[in-house]
Image: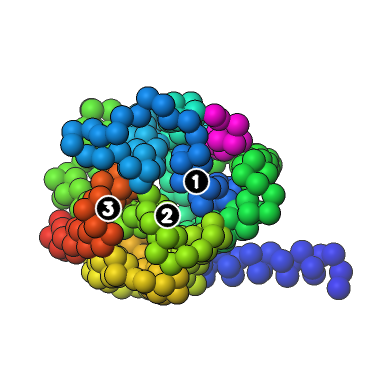
Amino acid sequence: MSLESGASWRSRLVTAVVERWGISRSLAILSVSQAGASFGAGLIIPLLAPLVAGVEAPMVPATVAGIRVTQEVQVGVFFAVFGVVRSAVQLPMGHFSDRIGARKPFVEAGLLVTAGVIYAYGITGSLGVLLSVRALHGVALAISTPALMALLERLTVGESRGSAMGFFSSLRTLGWGVAPIVGGAVADVYGLQATFSLGAVLIVAMVVVIRVGIPDVSTAVDEPDEDTADVDSGRIFSSWSQARSFCGLVVAVITVMIGVSAVISMEMPILERIGGSKASFGLVFAITTITRLVVQIPVGRATDRFGRMVFIAAGLFLSAPLVALMGFAQTLWGFVALRALLGVALAGVIAPVYALAADLADAGRTGLQMGFVTTAFSIGFAVGPVVTGILSTVGFAVPFVVTGGATAVAGVCVVVLVDG
């Protein structure tokens, strides 16, 4: 085969992939880099609760407002600090990204700070320092996430956005899903610091991939169309319908992320219940993302054909009983089975929410408006461990049942509020 015919064959293959799936070379590279970064960050998931339990905390009171400050509550607060800081910083960073028209530099800067933070986790010696590092972790993701979502919007088109978002989400999920299992195993053999260092190195490597492989496609500020001529008027949304829809998406994301993160502050009670190691908990946490990975792309394609909203609502209604039943699981494989089915349900929520938010967003306000959705993820991930940590003082099943009920209510909110 000649060089010309080989190049022609590759060109036709790339064209076919782009036309069928909406996946450009830049989107593929971005997806791979995010998979690697998610793997690096996900390595430390099963290590965080033991890390909090193992540091010195001499100033922590025994009770606050009548609530016992158990180990589970401390873990919940640790995760809440991350979410609160990220939520507070994310919208201003998205707006700043819109104003100056930069996307890739924000993504790279956020990942570099994340790498430094993950390394720092392993060398902290007190709860106060650990909470400060966790807050900086929230700032790092607040810098990168709105710009990442806006960059995705630029690299996808409406008619194939579900497929493209499904592809991106699947690769990202692959890294996030496998990593906790690997991280738990590495920590069991080599120790915590080796795992933190490995995560930091992987994230830095992904920054290099982004720098070299993705062009600066978003260096110019979006041009507003005739429907968004008031971008600079100070209004966040261009219509009541748009505001109502984003409100519904925010409620959906917060509640579903509470359900996903419910197990984090419950790591110790779960391991006591089922008997297991850090690797066992890594499997419980990771199986949700692994099963979501399997079905995410076909679900994304289906949303292009049948609409986004019906899948989001269905995913929420399916998630509700699965989360509630976790409160009654007695074995490792019981937890694994419920979390695996939860991953299937989440495939109907996560990527379709991103795709619908991109469909609804106005030119010139993409970073700000999609920032509401990414902020909702942060809030849900922050609130989940705190809520479950506090409710677990009443009984093991209580946080799961309450969260499952809230997820069902969120499904109703989506049906009532969201257009799409």
Identified by mark 3, the residue type is Ser
Q: Position of residue 187 (x, y in %)?
A: 63, 51
Q: Where does label 2 land, which residue?
A: 267
User: What is the total number of numbered labels drawn onto the structure image?
Assistant: 3
Identified by mark 2, the residue type is Glu
Q: Are marks 3 and 1 in contact (CB under 8 Å)?
A: no
Residue 165 as seen in the image, left or right of residue 384: right
Which span is picked out in magenta? 111-125
Hey, which quadrant is residue 97 in on the image? top left
- What secondary structure is found at the residue carrying circle 1? helix
Q: Are marks 1 and 2 in contact (CB under 8 Å)?
A: yes
Q: Position of residue 84 (x, y in %)?
A: 33, 35
Of callouts 1 and 2, the N-terminal one = 1
Of callouts 3 and 1, the N-terminal one = 1
Q: Is residue 419 above or below residue 147?
A: below
Q: Where does label 1 land, which residue?
A: 50
